[in-house]
Amino acid sequence: MIVACLASQFVCAQPQSATARFDVISIKKGDGVTMSANPPIKGGRIKFTDVTLVDILSVAYPVDVLHMFGGPAWVSSEKYDVEAITDDVAVSTGRYHQMLRTMLAERFMLALHQETRQEPIYVLEADSKGVKLKPTPPGGCVVLPVGAAPPPKTAICNDFSGSRTHLEGTGLTMAKFADILSYIVGRRVSDNTGLTARFNIRFDYTPGNAVAVDQVGASDSPPSIFAVLGQLGLRLRSEMGPVPVLFIDHVEQPSGN
């Protein structure tokens, strides 16, 4: 068991540092009304609402929910409201994720391990004729440590929002854009554009690889995500590549507080 744990990247999900933890944690049953699955940490406070354990795992670990296996059925069905507070109001992204992992290990008794599989992925590439993206102007956004309060009326780099048919982001790196595309296309996307600038990106799209057509044959929806990327001078090339996979070895429901 010890050898198996040491061979794992996550070392059975035990925290790397005993100090990488929240000072106060509250876990309650979700109200089933409003969901916030990836909230920002502000002023040392984070609040997930109406989320499953799998939702929190997808934030704490670099693995999408389609590549998480094991555990009882409740890990993807039971909803929780989780609020946590730390005195450190400007933690790094890596430390914030480690604090979440510590919380999961201590409050959910979570133990897990990771493997890497070869699966179909997409590689994001730039057209040889050039891309049609809007560069973020100098000073158009600021890079802040996780949890730091942004200056008034200032855009945050790599900030984005969207829905199943719309996406907009400010100061996105291509690596960040590739991560966002992974959730849209349902497959890991690796950035190979070679672009180092930041871009402001905004577009509508139709999920899947087809444009919805009404009864008279006219297009009644935005283009597919693949077509939109083509319009931006980008493309997704399919190939086999390494994909991280997470296995839940042990987990317990937390006591409410």
Image (spheres, rainbow, N blue to C red):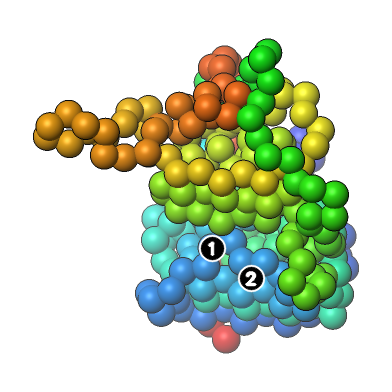
In the rendered view, tell whether residue 235 sits above or below residue 40. above
In the rendered view, tell whether residue 133 sits above or below residue 131. below
In the rendered view, tell whether residue 83 sits above or below residue 15. below
Amino acid type at image mark 1: Ala
Residue position marked by numbered label 2 in the rendering: 107
Q: Earlier in the sequence, mark 1 or mark 2?
A: 1
For numbered disc 1, what is the local secondary structure? loop
In the rendered view, tell whether residue 71 sits above or below residue 145. above
Report the residue at 62% width, 54% height from top: 160
Q: How busy is the neighbourhood of tag 1: few (under 14 within 10 Å), some, or many (20 plus)?
A: some
Residue position marked by numbered label 1 in the rendering: 37
Image spot of residue 46 (x, y percent): 67, 73
Which residue extends farthest left? Answer: 215
Report the residue at 52% width, 68% height from top: 36
> In the drawing, what numbered circle is on residue 143?
none
Residue 39, quarter of picture: bottom right
Give the CA distance from mark 1 to mark 2.
Answer: 18 Å
Q: How many marks?
A: 2
Q: Between 32 and 148, which is closer to the camera in this rendering?
A: 148
Report the residue at 31% width, 40% height from top: 221
In-image side of 76 versus 47 (left or right): left
Report the residue at 57% width, 86% height from top: 257
Image spot of residue 98 (x, y percent): 77, 58
Q: Between 195 and 255, which is closer to the camera in this rendering?
A: 195
For numbered disc 2, what is the local secondary structure? helix
Amino acid type at image mark 2: Arg
Image spot of residue 179 (x, y percent): 63, 40
Quarter of the figure with the N terminus: top right
Q: Between 198 and 113, which is closer to the camera in this rendering?
A: 198
Residue 40, quarter of picture: bottom right
Q: How busy is the neighbourhood of tag 2: few (under 14 within 10 Å), some, or many (20 plus)?
A: some
